Image (cartoon, rainbow, N blue to C red):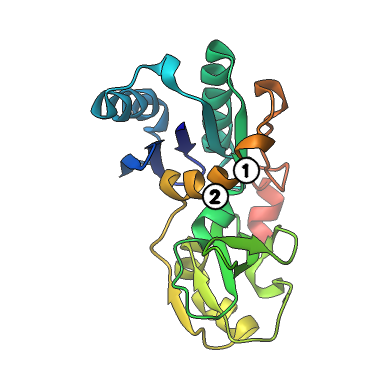
Amino acid sequence: MNLLAIETATESCSVALLSGERLFARSEIAPRRHAELLLPMCDEVLAEAGLARRGLDAIAVGRGPGAFTGVRLAVSAAQGIAFALGVPVLPVSSLAALALQAPDNGAPILAVIDARMGEIYAGWYRRTASGLVEAFAAETVGNAADLALATHERCSVIGTGWATYRELLRERVGEPAWADGDCHPQAVDIARLALPHLRDGVAPEQALPVYLRDKVALTLDEQRRR
């Protein structure tokens, strides 16, 4: 099985290729350069694996939530490659991929991405018996001070939302069991989450982005009120 994974929902641009038992990956923190880097990264991992694009069996993609342009780029690239090759697409939550980087310490995981405009994208996850993660509440977007609590257990917190809104989140969830605000969703984890669901792939046109909100900037009046 040859699975190419793409993730560009945040400042990190990343690509991974699972080819049998082998893993090849590229990742770079490169705001505003994702469109420039993405396809060359795909070509690099394929070349390193000695695999032509026609050897791919499926494309996994981080479907968001995250930056509008980044999510659109990843999904459109996955759709284009999959359509050209006649292979399915496996959309995966970017928040779930972020949560997968948290340590397996028995605590529930709160994955939070800085959504700008005073808001965060948030998702609650638990480890599965297989070592992956599964959501136990719906993904949300909103003010960090209004974060909906899906559990009262002490949790691990991961993602840029923690770096930006640490104090507000600490007021909501208490002192975390573990926290890291310097992590971004990665294609390696998109691939890991997609792998058990290869039979659930969809046609390229059915692979849709998830934004959670439909607004990308504050109006002048809203900026003045903040």
Q: Mark 2 and 1 residues: CB-CB less than 8 Å, in contact? A: yes
x%, y% of residue 25? 32, 40
Question: Where is residue 83 shown, x and y percent of the image?
Answer: 59, 15
Side of 157 relative to 150 (left or right): left
73 and 178: which is toward the camera: 178
- Residue 20 x %, y %: 39, 37
- What SS does tag 1 mark? helix
Which of the 4 image quarters holds residue 49? top left
Q: Nearer the viewer, mark 2 or mark 1?
A: 1
Mark number, residue 193: 2
Q: Which is nearer the eye, 48 or 10? A: 48
Q: Residue furthest left?
A: 48
Q: Residue at x 70, y 54 (%)?
A: 222
Q: Residues within 10 Å of mark 1 (few under 14, many from 20)?
A: few
Residue under circle 1? 197
Q: Position of residue 205 (x, y in %)?
A: 70, 21
Up-down relation of residue 217 to residue 75 (above or below)? below
